[in-house]
Image: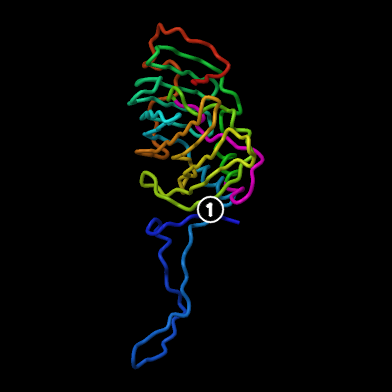
Amino acid sequence: MREGQLSSGRFAWALPIVAAGIVIVGLTGGSIVITGLLTTGPPDTPSASEAVDRVEDLRSVQLLSNTTRQVNGNNSWVVSEQTVRTGTGEFRSEIVATNGSQAGTGSLTVSNGSVRLVYLAESDRAFRSTVEESEQSDLKTQVKSLFGAVGDELERSIPIFPAFSATGADDSSAEWRDTPVTVEYRGVETVAGRESYVLRLEPTVDDARLVHNTLWFDREFLYPIQYHRVIDRPEGRYEFVSTPQTVEFNPSLEEDPFELNAEAIPSDMPVVETERFDSR
């Protein structure tokens, strides 16, 4: 069963339309009786195979996003520029503005698909780690699982690419990702000028770290351009909202933004080798 939510005036497709069943009962008086009134619902989500077809048309994405984080009533935000080459694990995120992230403006995360480099400008530290195969986050596999499971239960939660950012204290921990979830379809909303399917993931077990995860997938390419994620950790409840200001699909990448020797990172900076960067 597909579930959706409608609010007055929110969706163009929620306006009632008159069906063809109109009977003229008084030609002289011009009165009519409407015998059938249909209301359109939210557009159906694509099947698993249709979802894969849409993702295959996507090669790269560039976003300018605002991400807010709330922890125990304390709020912070960052604005970041992100570039993703889908299906390769290549990813770049740079903070261009912030009101208090421990990472700081100029912080950078770069992955070439096999190695990830994280530079924290505020503390002037850098970390290098190997990208695990599970972290490369095959978008095709994910959307196939999610849209194939609308209204049903997934055996486990799945990470949504990209899993890492330069926010300094983000929600990249894998501790919630093994949680079984249900997938609920909540209709279509417009995000940054793009119509997007809204999916909400909720855990099916009581002791899950994940509280809920709502994702907005661009209808054309099925890339998750916005999310609202709530996670419980021992130190408190973390709430993240990431909203794009601008989105560009399949941009021309004239320069390689995924080179690890980025000029933004000082050449004399000592780099700490880690198995996995966790910014908490």
Q: Is residue 168 left or right of residue 129?
A: left
* Residue 278, percent from left and from top: 52, 20
Q: Nearer the viewer, residue 118 or 202?
A: 202
* Residue 52, percent from left and from top: 56, 45
Q: Is residue 148 magenta?
A: yes
Residue found farthest to the bottom = 28
Mark 1 residue element: loop
**Location of residue 42 with respect to 97 vertically, above or below:** below
Q: Main secondary structure of the magenta part?
A: loop
**Location of residue 58 with respect to 151 vertically, above or below:** above
Q: Which residue is mark 1?
A: 45
Q: Nearer the viewer, residue 259 or 181?
A: 181
Residue found farthest to the right = 155
The amino acid type found where label 1 is placed reads: Thr
**Location of residue 266 with respect to 44 vertically, above or below:** above
Q: Is residue 198 left or right of residue 148?
A: left
Q: Residue at x 52, y 46 (%)?
A: 199
* Residue 173, percent from left and from top: 55, 26
Q: Is residue 95 magenta?
A: no
Q: Which residues are magenta?
A: 147-165
Q: State how the image is colored.
A: rainbow
Q: Residue at x 42, y 38 (%)?
A: 250
Q: Residue at x 50, y 10 (%)?
A: 272
Q: Residues within 10 Å of mark 1 (few under 14, many from 20)?
A: some
Residue 208: which quarter of the image?
A: top right
Q: Residue at x 56, y 19 (%)?
A: 276
Residue 263: which quarter of the image?
A: top left
Residue 100: which quarter of the image?
A: top left
Q: Quadrant of the N terminus?
A: bottom right
* Residue 145, percent from left and from top: 61, 43
